[in-house]
Image (cartoon, grey):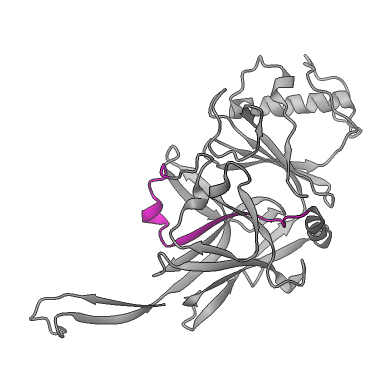
Amino acid sequence: MDYFWEVTVAPDSANFVGGSLQGEVVIARVRNAYFAKKIVENAGTSVRFEQINSSPVGKTVYLIVETEQMQGEQLRVSVRSRGHVLGEEEVLQVMRFDHTQIATQPYVAATEIEKTVGNFGDLNNNADAHDHYTNLDTDHADKAIIKLQLHPSTRAAFNSWTQVIGNGQVNLEITIGSEAARYGETDEVTEQGAFLCEGEGFRVENRNFYEICSNINRTNDNPYNFFQMQGANRRKIGCVLNNNSTQVVYFYYDQYGNETRIAECNRTTVMGRLNGVILTSVPPGYTSMEMPRLVLVVRLNIIITMLMGLLLLPAHIKIKSQIQIPQKLEIE
C-alpha cells in the first residue's frame, strides 16, 4: 500500500504549492521477522521481546514482525522448514494462540496466520486483558505480535517431526505476505517476503520439557498460567513428552510470564511413582542412575525445595500437596 503525506506551511514558503507542501511517497515496509521470548519489567507494566535462535519443538514462543508505515494493516504470516524437510507442504501447521478461546482451548491449529499490525490480543492474560502494559502504543504499535506453539495438531504429525529432527536440528523460516510492501532492506515492492533464510537462523530441536508456573501467592492464580483447571485450581506444571529425545529441560515462569531455564539433564523413566512420603534425609545411593522409586521421591523433593521460594509454597506442606501430575501436551 502506498502512503502520501502533506504538510501545511506558511504561504511565503518557497515550497508552498496550492496551500500544501507536497512530500515524497512512503512505501510500507516489513523490516524484520523473528522468534522471541517475552520479557516483562517494571512490576508488570512494561513488556519487550528478546530474539531467540532455538527452541525445543512444541514449545510456546512469540513470532514478532517489525514494520514501518503499516499500522492497522493485516499480514499473512506462515512458518516453513528450510528445504521442506518437515514435510512437502509449503508451510507448516502450528498452534496459534486465540485469546477468544482462553476459557476452553486457547491454542488452535493454523497454517497461514492473519495478524493485524498493532493488535495486542496475543499478549492477553488468562483474564483476557493486556491493559496493564503501559508501553504498547509507544514501543510496539508497528509490530505484529503472534503467540504460537511450535508443533502440529496431531500426535502422528508431531512424531513425524521429531523423527526427522532426530539428534540434530531443523531450521525454520518465516514468510510474510501483504498487499504490497518492501521486505527487509530491499527497495523492491512485492506481495511476499521471507526471513531467517540464511545462516543458522532459527532452529528447533528434540527435547522433553517441563513448564512450571508460579503462584502469585498461596491461593491466587497466576494470570499467565494457561494450563487446564484441576477441580477448583489450575494446574501448575505442564510437560511435553518427546519420544525421540533422551534429554529433558525445565522452565520456570513467574507471575508476569517471564521465563527462566532452570536446568537440562538426561531423561530417566521409572515404572511407577510414590507420592506423599516425607524424607528427613537423603538415603545412600541417591545419585544412582538406576533411579529406584524411593530415590525418585528424594529427587522430586530436592527439586521442589529449590523452587519453594519461587513458587511461594510454605515449607511445612507435605510433598504430596506439592507434586501435581503435569498436564501433558494435548496432541491426539
Q: Residue furthest left?
A: 12
In the rendered view, would you say 150 is above or below 184? above
Q: Residue at x 67, y 50 (%)?
A: 59
Quarter in which the N terminus is drawn: bottom left
Q: Could you say where residue 316 lies in the image, as x and y percent from the top left?
A: 66, 14
Magenta segment range?
A: 131-154
The vertical placement of 185 against 78, above or below, is below
| Residue 328 magenta | no
The mark total stands at 0
Q: Quadrant of residue 257?
A: top right
Magenta run includes residue 132 = yes
| Residue 105 seen from this side | yes
Find residue 297 and report its horizontal and vertical position in percent: 81, 24
Quadrant location of residue 201?
bottom right
Relative side of 94 to 139, left or right = right
In the image, residue 129 above or below residue 169: above
Picture coordinates of residue 328, whole percent (x, y):
74, 41
58 over 285 or under it: above or below = below
Answer yes or no: is residue 235 visible: no
In the picture, residue 239 is in which quadrant? top right
* Residue placed most toward the observer, 320 or 263: 320
- Residue 19 percent location from the top left of the image: 14, 80
